[in-house]
Image (cartoon, rainbow, N blue to C red):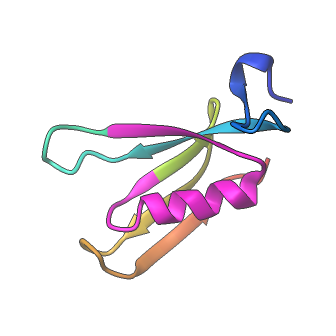
Amino acid sequence: MLRDKERTPRADGGVWMKIYTLKFLDDGNGGARRLDFGASDLAEALIVAHRKAAKCTAELWQGARKLCTIRREGAGGPMQSARFLSAY
């Protein structure tokens, strides 16, 4: 269960969303970066993660738990793998 500090309200004032972090691996151009975003569930988080990491490799996290790694084969190349380490 997420603690209150790991949740954020939706912009429309509706249902609380879970916070996920997309960690982009160091691409050799200035270090690693991260993107924190809200999603209603894991499925929505995976969709966002795949769109945001369309041209690079990234890890999807929920709090301290690594959910999966999205690997890309070169810039703009096809997805090589998305390995799930845990679903919840």
Which residue lies most toward the front here? 12
- Does residue 75 show up magenta in the picture? no
Tell me if 55 is positioned left or right of 48 in this view: left
Q: Is residue 64 above or below residue 41?
A: above
- Does residue 37 show up magenta in the picture? yes
Q: Nearer the viewer, residue 14 or 79?
A: 14
Q: Is residue 78 visible?
A: yes
Displayed quadrant of residue 19: top right
Which residue lies most toward the bottom here? 78
Q: Give residue 32's position: percent from left, percent from top.
A: 29, 39
Tell me if 62 is positioned left or right of 33 in this view: right
| Residue shown at 78% from the left, 51% from the top | 41
Displayed quadrant of residue 54: bottom left
Q: Is residue 24 above or below residue 71?
A: above
Q: Give residue 36's position: percent from left, percent from top.
A: 52, 36
| Residue shown at 45% from the left, 40% from the top | 35
Q: Bounds of the magenta span?
A: 33-58
Q: Quadrant of the N terminus?
A: top right
Q: Is residue 88 above or below residue 5?
A: below
Q: Give residue 68's position: percent from left, percent from top.
A: 58, 55
Q: Nearer the viewer, residue 21 or 48?
A: 48
| Residue shown at 69% from the left, 36% from the top | 11
Tell me if 81 is positioned left or right of 78 in this view: right
